[in-house]
Image (spheres, grey):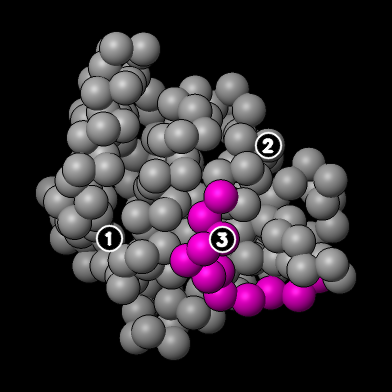
């Protein structure tokens, strides 16, 4: 595998891998159209950090995306792409209104008074089913962290589920992350916020 920064026009590959890696998860339930819009907007942002793993045929097999400044990132992303997200919001409103409420309520993941949001954030990391078990995720995190550090970031965070997620949490602990705090996401979903010094 080789690792590189994701190009803006590769957003559809990220959406495909997201659907492959996170079958049955909330964002996947919003569909490929929403994921295409989200990753396209994210990759266009100057605040975005996005790296990927490519095989010998230059096919993307995994990715890690996030931002250099966590505080308000998604709100700024929506405002810069308001027409695109309004269209997606209307579609979700008519097809899955409860999902729209959940999406809106979870825009701001800062749930602790001591959290100023002044850090980079790893928002999504996914590896295709065909490349699982090859160490791609571990390397993607390192490449993502190197890119964040190159941009002057000193800390990096991520959020992950608290319950029924021990394997993933251990993976992050082995990657040098520690518990920053715990919080409840809508609707009643207990989460870990993890943090690491770069």
Instruction: Tell whether position 11 is magenta.
Output: yes
Q: Nearer the viewer, mark 1 or mark 3?
A: 3
In the figure, residue 172 lies in which quadrant? Answer: bottom right
Nearer the observer, 60 or 151? 60
- Name the residue at 52% across, 55% down: 11
- Name the residue at 61% across, 35% down: 19
The magenta stretch is 1-12
Residue 83 relative to residue 165: left or right: left
Nearer the observer, 69 or 128? 128
Q: Nearer the viewer, mark 2 or mark 1?
A: 2
Q: CA distance from mark 1 to mark 3?
A: 23 Å
Q: Is residue 69 above or below residue 100?
A: below
User: Badge 2, how many Cα within 10 Å: few under 14, some, many 20+?
Assistant: some
Q: Is residue 176 above or below residue 125?
A: below
Instruction: Tell whether position 80 is magenta.
Output: no
Q: Quadrant of the C terminus?
A: bottom left
Count of marks placed on residues:
3
Determine if residue 171 is in view.
Answer: no
Nearer the observer, 47 or 10? 10
Q: What residue would you read off at disc 1?
A: 70
Image coordinates for residue 121, horizontal then vertical, percent: 38, 61
User: Badge 1, how many Cα within 10 Å: few under 14, some, many 20+?
Assistant: many
Q: What residue would you read off at disc 2?
A: 20
């Amino acid at each position: 595998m080789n690792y590189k920064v994701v190009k803006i026009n590769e957003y559809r590959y990220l959406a495909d891998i997201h659907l492959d890696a996170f079958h049955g998860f909330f964002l996947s339930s919003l569909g490929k159209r929403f994921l295409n819009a989200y990753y396209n907007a994210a990759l266009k942002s100057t605040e975005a950090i996005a790296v990927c793993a490519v095989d010998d045929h230059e096919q993307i097999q995994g990715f890690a995306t996030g931002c250099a400044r966590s505080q308000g990132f998604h709100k700024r992303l929506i405002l810069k792409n308001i027409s695109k997200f309004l269209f997606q919001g209307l579609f979700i409103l008519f097809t899955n209104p409860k999902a729209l409420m959940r999406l809106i309520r979870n825009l701001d993941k800062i749930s602790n008074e001591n959290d100023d949001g002044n850090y980079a954030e790893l928002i999504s990391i996914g590896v295709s089913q065909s490349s699982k078990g090859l160490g791609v995720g571990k390397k993607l995190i390192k490449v993502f962290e190197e890119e964040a550090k190159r941009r002057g970031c000193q800390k990096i965070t991520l959020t992950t589920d608290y319950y029924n997620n021990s394997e993933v949490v251990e993976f992050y602990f082995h990657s040098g992350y520690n518990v920053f705090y715990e919080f409840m996401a809508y609707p009643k979903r207990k989460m870990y916020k993890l943090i690491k010094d770069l």
